[in-house]
Structure formats: C-alpha cells, structure tokens
Amino acid sequence: MSALDLNAIEETLRAEIEGDVIVSVDADAAQPGFTVAAERMTEVALVLRDSFGFDRLLNVAGIDHEGFDDKGKGKHRKIAQYAEDGTVEPVTDPATADFGVAYHVQNLSTKAMIVLKVRVPRDDAKVATVSSVWPTANWGERETYDMYGIEFTGHPDLRRLLLPEDWVGHPLRKDYEMPARYHDVPLEGLPLAVREAQQIDGGDGE
Amino acid sequence: MTDMHVKYDPATRKGDEAKPIKSELLHINMGPQHPSTHGVLRLFITTDGEVVHSVTPYIGYLHRCAEKIAEGNTYHQYTIYTDRMDYLAAMNCNWGWCYAVEQLMESVGAGVEVPEYAEYVRVIIGELNRIASHLIAFGTYGLDIGALTPFFYALREREAILNIFEKVCGARLMYSYYDIGGVKWDIPPDALEEIELFVKLFPKKLDEYNALLTGNKIFVERTADVGVVDEETCLAYGCTGPVLRAAGVKWDLRKDEPYSIYDRFDFEVPVGTGAMGTVGDCWDRYWVRMEEMAQSTRIIEQALAQMPREGEVMADMPRKLKIPTGEIFARTECPKGEMGFWIVSDGGGEPFRVKTRSPALHNLHVIEKVGEGQMISDLCATIGSLDLVLGEIDR
C-alpha cells in the first residue's frame, strides 16, 4: 500500500468545506484516516472522490461503543444478559455510549486506502449519506441502519437490508434484547422462561 | 406471439398504433426458491411482458447475524463461523479471517510469523478451493441457461478436490482447516501425491470444458452482450473479483497487494476483453473464471515445486489469545471477490466488533442497475454469471 498524504487531504478538506469538518486526524492508526463531522460526510466524500481519486468504497461498518474498555483489558460490560435460570439480569444503567460508522475507501490507481470515521450520539444518530457519491454505500448504509438504527439523512431508500421489515430492534446494538416471538413463532435461543416473561411480540410492531 | 416485436413506448405503456397491444406492468417474485437464484434469494421484478423494468433484491433469508456471534466468541472459535459464509470456498473464508486476525496482531505489535511451510500449505489448499468454487460456478452456470452436461463434468473434478480436502482435514465442506498462525495439520503424503496428480491432469479437463461450453454457439448467444457491467459501474457498486476483472480492470489482491507468499509465484491476471461481445458481459465473466482456474493450477504447481520438504505448520501462539486495543480492515482475494474483515479489539479475548465485507453482496447489488431493461431469461443468465453464494451475502 502506497503512502497516504494525510496533510494534503486535510488542507484541501479545510479549504474546500466551510466550518470545522475534521474532528480529529488519526495519523497514528494502523490504517490512517480522519474522524469527520457526521453531518458533513457527503461533502467530505465528494472532495475525496473528485480531488483525490478515492473511487472505491470498500466497506461501510457501524459500531456501538457501549462498554468499550478504555483501559484495554477487554472487560467490556456485557449488557442484556440472561442468567441460566432464565431470568433477565437487570441492566443497572442504560447504554449511553455513542455510535460510530467507519468507511474504508481506496484509490484504485495509487492503491492508497483511507479510513473515514464519524461518531454520533446514541439518542440522535444521524449521518449524512454518501450513497450519492459511492452508490455501493446504498446497501452498506441500509445494513448499518438495519443493525444499529443509525439514520442516514438523504438516503434514497432507507429500509432494512437483512432483517424482515417488521422486525423490532437493531441486533448489533450492545443493549439489544431479542424479542420473544416473531409473528407468534417463539424464537429459539432464549430460555423459555425469558420468552414467557417478556411476552414481546416482535411481529406486529406494537 | 406475433406482436412480440411491436415497438414499446414506456410513456404510454403501449405498442405502436399500427399493431396496438395491451400491456401492463406485472409484479413477480422470483425466488426465494427459484432454481436460478443459487440459494434463497428473492428478486422482486416488475415486468412488461418479457422485459424487466426494475429488479429489487430481498436478502436475509440465511441471516444468522454472524457479526453478533463474533462478539461472544474467541478469535479461534469464530473461524468455524467463517466456514458457513461462502460454503463453496470455506478454506478461503477461513484464510481471510485468520489473515485479518494476524494483521491485527501485527498492527498492535504482537505479531506472529506464519511458518514458511504453512504459507505454502495455505496457498496450495486455497488455490484448490478456488478451483472447486469456480467449477461450481462453471457447472451451475451451464445449468442456469440450459446446458446440463457441464455440471457433471464440473462435479467430477470437484469431487477429486473434496476427496483431497477430506484426506487433509477430514471434512468435505466445512473445513476450519486454517488457524490463526498457520494451519491445523500437515498435509498427509498421499494427499500431496493426489494434488500433484490433480494439477497434472486438470489442464486437460479444462480443455474438455472449453470444448463443451466455451465456444458453444447456443452458449455464446445466451451470454455475449448480455448483462454488461462496465468498469465505471463495477467501481461504483464495489464489484470485485471476476466481475471486476471481466470489466477489463487488471486488479487482483494477490498481485496488487500481495499477501501471504503470492509475490513468489508467476501467474497472470486474466481480464475480460470482449472476445465474444462487449467487455464485461456474461461471457467475459465466465471466461475470466475459466482462465483463473488455469492460473490457479500454475500457482499450485509452482508452490509444490518450491515448498520445503517439511516444516512447522503452526507458529508459536499463546494458549489464550488476547489482542491489545486496535483495529484493522484486512482483505484477501476469495473466489467471489475481495473478502474483508474489519476487526476492533479492546484488549480482550473476544473481538469487540467484527464486520465482514462480503464480495457477493456487492456483486449482487449491481443487479439493480444491470437488470433494468433485460429480458427475464437474460436476467437469469446475468445472476448466474455473478456467481452468488447467499450464505456469504446474508452472513
């Protein structure tokens, strides 16, 4: 992989887009890039594609930072757990950590790859879409919406991608609790006591 | 039937005045159990007669939320779930995962060096699985458009490969043979002999396939100039692998961002030339796969010649693998395209987040664009040429 001129990109981004668009420069990361403002994502993507030739969006991935262990011990708090006797262990404090979205973009001719990241608060998770810049993001953002409930503003067709349209909840959130039933079908995988205690109908979306 | 060729006006949804035909849009569900969708893919098609107006894929019938499962399993345990992604090329998926974890370990300064002998084993087995996967693509593609015979020829050779894999690791479909830091076991000597025999015989078999299907007039009529995915569309929709190369882009991770020991082998990257029609049509995608099988055979031959007689198959690995805080996005060239894993670790024994970049998902996405305006029968030909595996798309 060839060298990536982060400084040049940073200068151009600051010059071409008004306001404070770059939140931080992740130059020391194994795969360098920027953390940018979520609502300016479309403009950033446009500059990267048109001025620097980043023409291939390889990957769009969401992340829920809830429980991420800052000390690096890997003891992230697991929430929404089920005890062996089938009772739900109470969640002492609700999830508060923010969501993130990472975009891995490559320039086909120079082979340079850049990682773009955004972080959005949990209660107002909105990111500007890049599907107008890289059409493949259409499905990547739909999947992220499906799994995390992150809303992509300006997306032409923001539907669930993998789960059924009437599914309740976003499974890759760390505080996700699996519904007990889907269309009156009890869901396997949960202890029976949990299913009966929850009485959640995942089917009709009530 | 005589009215089939009346010029169609999309604005009025009618034919020309001389021969008025009444037509209206028809909504059809193709799948999820349609034989040409290679699994459980549902295409919602709007058609006018035989012409497709719009295609909307509905996926997720095989969704197992493997990414959530990853968060509750150790790095070693998750290897088994990668088998279930592209089940026709499970070795390559294993490899992609193990490579990504190794890259993550290296990026946080806890790198392991995969023994040289193990790298050769990985290349040989991985390329064999690429051939097996392309054989299925070749065989089922014939089936999709009405040629039954090639399928049996393809399965005959795939059977030989599966027999080798059975000797190597005991399994025929879900191998879990690659491990982080190497491979689980050495190749037994009799399996090695079988591989040598296979690469000696396989070029002749390829000639057989070509005689059967490649130049067949009916086959060419059905595939040339059909479902053209050009370079621009490929890049926009994230298509990789044979789909991208058929569009004339010489891009192969094994050549352009060599991982493992691929820089030691001499092989070509076949690209589509539009020999039978347009660059990037179904025939080109088919042809690129046929050529790749020949190139894979070359790689295996060279690997067998260069390979040390014996050696370690595993690096020294900690018994309990814990990776310091870090993240990586690492890709390998799987038969279907570039498979990538984005792994975020927070220092524990389990990954904090794993995202799989599925090549077939991106290759499928393009059908929304390419399918428009095709005949229904051409749509089947196009889907077949994309070589989809739903286990990997839905994960």
Image: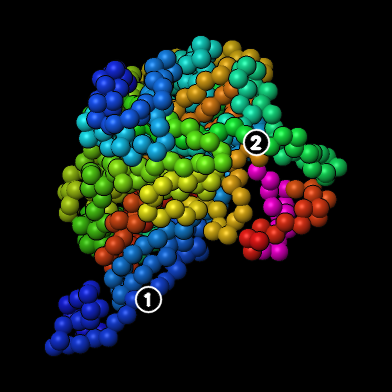
> Can residue B274 be seen in this snapshot?
yes
Is B170 displayed left or right of B212 in the figure?
Answer: right
Under mark 2, the amino acid is Ala
Residue B94: where, in percent of width, then height?
52, 32
Along the viewing direction, whichever of B25 and B255 lies nearer the viewer = B25
**Residue at mark 2 shares a chain with residue at mark 1:** no
Task: Report the residue at 23% width, 79% height from top.
Answer: B12
Distance from disc 2 to disc 1, alpha carbons, whole Å, reads 47 Å
The residue singled out by tag 2 in the image is A95
Q: Are marks 2 and 1 in contact (CB under 8 Å)?
A: no
Residue found 54% across the figure and 12% down from its top: B110
User: Residue B40: within the magenta?
Assistant: no
Judged by depth in the image, the label closer to the viewer, 2 or 1, is: 2
Q: What residue sits 19% from the left and 76% below the top?
A: B9
- Locate the N terminus of chain B by quadrant: bottom left
Density class for disc 2 (Cα within 10 Å; few <14, some 14-19, many ≥20) is some
For label 1, count other residues whose C-alpha is less than 10 Å away and answer few (under 14), some (14-19) or many (20+): few
Name the magenta segment's main secondary structure.
loop
- Estimate the x, y position of residue B142 in percent, counting from the top left: 35, 57
Secondary element at tag 1? strand
- Residue at position x 50%, y 64% in the image: B33
Horizontal and vertical percent position of residue B120: 44, 21
Q: Residue B78 in the image: x percent, y percent?
A: 60, 33
Tell me the amino acid under the disc marked 1: Leu
| Residue denoted by label 1 | B26
Is residue B182 something that shows in the picture?
A: no
- Numbered disc 2: secondary structure: loop
Kindly identify which chain the residue marked by label 2 belongs to: A
Q: Which residues are magenta?
A: A176-189
Q: Classify A139 as above or below B318.
A: below
